[in-house]
Amino acid sequence: MGKYSNKWTRAAIPALLLHCSIGTVYCWSIFSQEIADYIGFSKGATEWAFSFAIFFLGMSAAFLGGIVEKDIHKSSLIATICFTLGMVGTGFFIWYGGTHKGSLVSLIGIYVCYGFIMGIGLGTGYLSPVKTLMLWFQDRKGLATGLAVAGFGAAKAIASPIMQAILAKFKSADGVANPAPMFFIMAAIYFVMMFVGHLLLKKPEGWHEPAASEKGSRPFDVIKTKPVTFIGIWLMFYINITCGLALISQEKMIIKCIGLVGIVGILSSVTAVFNAAGRLGFSAWADYYKDRNSIYKIIFILSIVATGLVILTQGITNMGQNTLFMVLVLILLFVVNAGYGGGFSNVPTLLSDHYGMQNISAIHGITLSAWAFAGLSGNQLATWIVKTFGKEEEIVHALADGTEEIIKVNPTGYQMVLYVTIALYVVAAIICFTMVGKKTEEAK
């Protein structure tokens, strides 16, 4: 059977079980309005729970990467407990908020549980299987990590219909849904999935972590050997996420703005597929390059071209009056989603090329702090631009029952977001070409 006989059961399957569970953090938009209505707060107030979750994902990965490096069983167990405990706690404070409308206790409790506690589970759960995958799949490291990270991206598409069905079961006569039972049910499902993943996850038999004296240095000492390269990787990772979130957060309204209101749900699912496919496809493609940084060059060039075409054609402000311009807008959304996903999956393998496999979990964790700050800046940047520039226009959408729906959009605001993102993509491309060099022989 050989050394790699259990790479699927000891690495790939547990990675998917862990990432398909924690990736449902992106399902927040499915139930955020229901939570706000049920506990008596505005949607804007509850939205901070998601921002905190992404922030603490990145920060816990940065500070707990050393634990992942030393013991993946401990880190995967921490991930399982914190993620599911956070879900149960979120459900409890939603229930409490339903019986105490407008109570700050419920809102703060949701922030702590969904944001902080779940955030710790997200960060440790995201890191735990990555190095193990790269050790098992030495020749196809990109394919392996892409598979797991694709699971994180695809989790929303898998869980969304289940969550919506549960929400529909717990809707009162006045139409207000109680999201608390959904959190309790999903927490039980994810605990089983993640605990099985925790039990299965194992590094190859021939691998042993070098002792501290063998390593000779800590993660920050390793980074200091090529500081400009690390800063470059961190910055282009941060910019890619910020631009991705800025456009993805406005995606549904952009689709409505160009006249595709009736199929906005279908197109959102298609963009989610591109997101997941980018995670797997770009990282698997990178295995064929001697320099994995080439993939980031491709991602940024494609993003600049797609964004530039929509800017030149004024595709969004055209509001669907020209079919070609409308198609260019859709291509932009597909490209940005694929590049956003590909940016995630290529980070660990790019880092391993430059810094080797020793301490890679800790170094990857430090790099994920970029995700923490981008999670706070991406959505808020786009929201500020849309509120500041242009004005809302009304479009009329005919419903299947013969009635009409009035939808408010701001085409000028959405178009203005593109001017900011293309500038950032150009900066990222410059960083990619100048600051991130080729891997050294020692890191191979």
Image: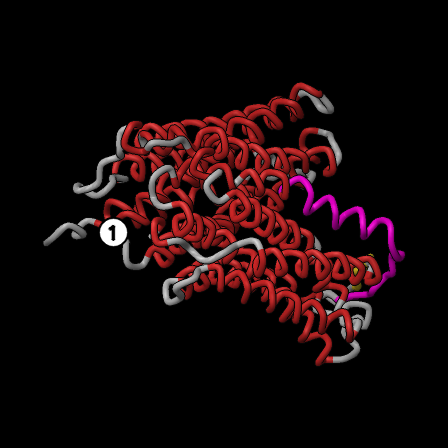
The quarter of the picture where the N terminus appears is bottom left
Q: Nearer the viewer, residue 190 or 390?
A: 390
Q: Position of residue 318 (x, y in %)?
A: 81, 73
Q: Nearer the viewer, residue 259 or 95?
A: 259
Q: Position of residue 351 (x, y in %)?
A: 44, 48
Q: Residue at x 63, y 39 (%)?
A: 373
Q: Is residue 400 visible?
A: no
Q: Residue at x 50, y 37 (%)?
A: 366
Q: Quadrant of residue 27?
A: top right
The type of residue carrying mark 1 is Trp
Q: Position of residue 272 (x, y in %)?
A: 54, 59
Q: Quadrant of residue 70?
A: top left
Identify the residue position indicated by label 1 in the image. 8
Q: Position of residue 116 (x, y in %)?
A: 56, 27
Q: Secondary structure at mark 1?
A: helix
- In this view, 424 is above or below 322: above
Which residue, as the protein is rendered here, is positioned at the far right? 391
Q: Check if residue 386 falls in the magenta segment.
A: yes
Highlighted range, magenta: 375-398
